Image (cartoon, rainbow, N blue to C red):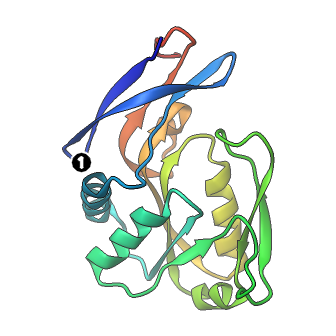
Amino acid sequence: MDRFYDITVAGVKRRLPICRVNDQLYIAAFVIFGDVELTVRSAEALLKKAPPFDVMITAESKGIPLIHEMAKQCGQNKYLLARKAPKLYMKDAEGIDVKSITTEKKQTLYIDAGDLEYMRGKRVLIIDDVISTGESLSALETIVRHGGGKIAGKMAILAEGDARDREDIRYLEYLPVFNEDGTILE
């Protein structure tokens, strides 16, 4: 039987399918890819809550449309991206290991040496679509510190599960996690 969770984010209502992570944990799948209205409205709402910053960074891939829209709305012509694999055009890419709730194996995020240098001394705002375990966030924090940037803040559209209790992040809405029967896991 299909189960769903209804949520309103930045005034936009969406129905999220509940998906199995493992036998004890189910999550509501929140995907902004292709959802222009949700991306634009979420970017606008996050920027209203954002601390002062010089540049933004996100991890590949679901944060990309969000950070792009945020940069567009605040008039910035550049943002930084940590990739899941080094690309041919990346010069001296550096990698940081990360484990995500939606990924079964350890991943590595890579950033170009030029982007590391670009963030040196700048206030860097870390952006993600959903913060859950905080592993991706931690990897981005390591990248920023390694590049000599100063963490201006950490933001996401949603804080999932225990992430809602973190005082170091700003987010728009809480997203619970679920039991197998679709009830909220307390």
Task: Indicate whether 111 appears above or below 41.
Answer: below
Q: Number of marks in the image? A: 1
Crowdedness near tag 1: few (<14), some (14–19) or many (≥20) residues, C-alpha within 10 Å? some
Name the one closer to the observer, 101 or 18: 18
Residue 33 appears at what percent x and percent y? 43, 54
Q: Give SS at disc 1.
A: loop
Query: Residue 60 appears in which quarter of the rendering?
Result: bottom right
Name the one closer to the observer, 136 or 21: 21
Residue 17 appears at what percent x and percent y? 44, 28
Q: Is residue 176 among what the camera can see? A: no
Task: Indicate whether 63 appears above or below 54.
Answer: above
Residue at which label 1 appears: 10
Residue positioned 51% across, 75% down in the render: 124
Q: Is residue 123 among what the camera can see? A: yes
Q: Is residue 26 left or right of residue 176?
A: right
Residue positioned 57% across, 23% down in the render: 26
Residue 52 appears at what percent x and percent y? 37, 75
